[in-house]
Image (cartoon, coloured by chain):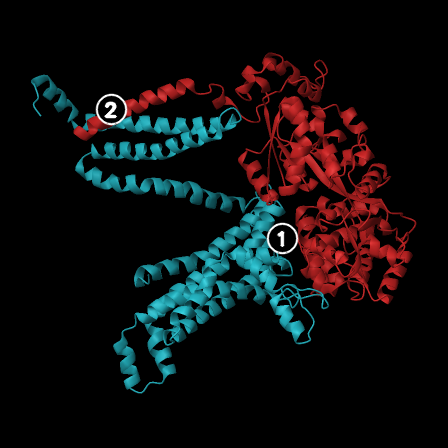
Chain colours: A red, B cyan
Amino acid sequence: MKTSRVLWSVLSVLLLGSMLMAACAPAAAPTAAPADTAAPAATSAPAATVAPAATTAPAATTAAKPAATGSFLDRAMAGEFKGTTVTATGPFVDQDAQKFAATMADFQAKTGITIQYQGSKEFEASIKAAMDAGNAPDVIDFPQPGLLASFAKQGKITDLSKQLDVAAVKANYNPYWIDQSMMPGKDGTPIMAGIWERVNGKGFVYYPKKAFDAAGYKVPTTFAELTTLEDQMVKDGSTPWCIGIESGAATGWVATDWIENIMLRTTTPENYDAWVAGKLPFSSPEVTNAAKIMASIWQNPKYVYGGTATIVKTSFGDSTLPMFDAKGPKCFMNMNGNFITSFFPATAKAGVDYGAFYFPPIDPKYGSPMEVAGDIWGATNTKPEVMAVMQYFTKAEHLKVWMQQGGAIAPQKDADLSWYGSDIDRVVGGAIVNAGTLRFDGSDAMPGAVGAGTFWKEMTSFVSGAEDLPTALKNIDASWPK
Amino acid sequence: MSMNTPESSRKSLISSPVVRAVAALVPLAISLVILTWGFFFVRDLQLVKNTIPQLFIVVIAIIWGVGGVVLLFTTANFFVEQLPELWVHRLQPFIFIGPAILMLTWALVIPTIRTIISAFFDEASVGFVGMKNFVYVFTNPAMLTVFRNNLLWVIFGTTFTVSAGLIVAVLADRSRFEVAAKAMIFMPMAISFVGAGVIWNFVYAAKPVDAPQIGLLNSIVVGFGGQPQAWTAFFQPWNNFFLIVIVIWLQAGYSMVLFSAAIKGIPAEIMEAARVDGATELQVFFQIMIPQIMGTIIAVSTTVVIFTLKIFDVVWVMTGGQYDTSVISTEFYRQYFTYNNNGIGSAIAVVLFIAVIPVMVYNLRQFAQREVF
């Protein structure tokens, strides 16, 4: 009896305590669903009740285009969403996450919106888990549009064309970028699923400028000149190419970039599109030819430093280091996206220690269309502060700090080339904004099972000598999801 | 205690078992309400965390979590104790293991069932596709390579881990340097699989022949005038063995320790008797020692079989499953998370699950029967 009496008194104290806690609990919180769109400002967070705009906001957000009170960005800049938080996630961490924070600092200071970014190296897995669980962050950076497309199809991504001023967005981008952001929604009709925030150009050949110039080499402008240059380097006792394809679980993507770049220079953009869409098989003469041209360089032990053993075992970043060897370059050229400069020695200066040229046209008929890749941001709700962030991404101004620090290329037309911190970035940025024909990185746009799967896998098998080319290409075709 | 009449009449009412049991339900219900409400309270605190200090949320969560568990246990136990004797005996065990069972159900059983269900659905878990995913798993050439690799892992990984451990245990037993030798073999056990992958990536590193070889294996090869090789990429399917070696290196210590203990447990008289009878050392080993420690050998073998079946980290770190080194776990991860194919990913997971079950059951039986630990 005694113990039970003690228990009863403990319980009554607890009951009283819980009543007290209930009384001071944030009353609005239990009903707040992150994706609640009916009356965003009133229920989204208790903070909204202290915001002066709480009464005007719902009216504005229900309108298709917030013309009456100005765009989301204008309203954010006027301080309307002060105190709100926008959560963000993406694949970039460490240095790039710091650059992102730096580039968004101005926005946060002006609008009072807090941006909470949490990056993950296992981004694909973590975002899928978060999406399935229904607690994905407000805005998400996708390095591969295919993943965004799969979430758009499940109806989990906001159609930005219903929220933002589409005409203004279109005016600021090459139409190809807009096309690439339209993805089928849940009912199959295309929605504008994301905003291209920053991009990178591929097919740039980096070379150690000092030694290159000292040896009397000239930047090749045709494929024939490139071959002459390669042979000249071999004759001089050096090696033309530095190549490495090791990249952990993503090993092999460097080979896919090579094939895509060669494809763009040896066939029509329409054929390239058909190939990416799965209509032109890998075993077709066009793709086979591109792979053969790549192999003619890669499998020539005189052309590649260390031969195929080094190719398969060297990480793509480390593969550039022999260009900067203290005793002079061991090899002279590395083809990659402009992000590769992050892997160069910290002391290497753009324009002095290294230069870059665009991989020359192979067949003059097709020129050299630009292969691009990039980061597209999707939103998971229509909260006004989230839309303000998305709208901010459509302006090159938001990237200014990052462009200055290097490593980001702006796809937006209002980007000022003088904002770039390095001459090489300026060349890449100008090339992307002014390019006539752009084509997205094919493997990133293919279904994951091919673009992040068999295309890598079969190319590594081919490069390591385990399979011949026709077998490898046939295996990729067989793996295309039906 | 001295009591007057009204109190004792109240007491008689309370001592009626039904009333007491029903009354005892009240605190249980209240604590359940507090727990549930606390969950939403903490969750919603998180939603508005930019206005509330993180530390405050953490403190609340700890009070709710630890206090809630204590409260729930106390009230539930109190409730059960009010019941008739027979029911106390029937229900009390569940008060103790109930929470554990609930947690296991929630975190293990339900996900397992969901995985099995989604194995029969398409990549977005929307349309029912029947056995299609399993047909793919067992007919796709890439999947067949995966099974072949797993078979290599199970057969060679287990055989070498067990025999290496056994040999070291037997030899160390007669050595003057037993402790030092065993410590050397056991040390890699302290290294995580990912860490071991990184270390062995350096062992296998290949540099161009004119550059300094930072990889141990290639510097030996080049030292003898050979060409540097990419061990984990070339020589398919033998490159798998360069990965299997890592796990043998890691796990031989584990089997050695168990065997060593088992060998020391063999009665000295039996060995003595065999030697007196003129048995050679090999005969003693095969006909006395092995049968005596058979239980340990089976237990160790099944344990190693299970983790080689599930092997993931080493492959993921070393090759990412490229160069035909993919195994069931890496392929499952790739299908589910990289290719976004819930159906095939789940089907592979189910196959792995089914493959592990018999070994697991056998293993548990052995542990129960022979009490090897």
Given the image, on which type of amino acid does mark 1 rest?
Answer: Ala
Q: Is residue A6 above or below residue A130?
A: above
Residue in the image at 72% along x and 36% along y: A402
Apparent side of residue B359 relative to residue A309 in the rendered image (left or right): left
Q: Name the image quarter holding the C terminus of chain B.
A: bottom left
Quadrant of the frame with the N terminus of chain B: top left
Separation (CA) of disc 1 from disc 2: 59 Å
Which of the 4 image quadrants contains residue B69?
Answer: top left
- Mark 1 vs mark 2: in front: 2
Q: Residues within 10 Å of mark 1 (few under 14, many from 20)?
A: some
Q: Earlier in the sequence, mark 1 or mark 2?
A: 2
In this rendering, does residue A478 appear at all?
no
Counting labels gives 2
Left or right of B275 in this view: B137: right
**Residue identified by numbered label 1:** A249
Q: Position of residue B153 (x, y in %)?
A: 53, 64
Chain letter of the residue carrying label 2: A
- Left or right: B116 in relation to A162: left
Residue with the mark numbered 2:
A9
State the residue at coordinates (67%, 49%): A452
Instruction: Give the crowd class for mark 2: few <14, some 14-19, many >=20 residues within 10 Å.
Output: few
Question: Element type at marker 2?
Answer: helix
Q: Amino acid at mark 2?
A: Ser
On the question of residue A288 being in view, the answer is: yes
B90, above or below A69, in the image: below
A91 with respect to A276 (left or right): left
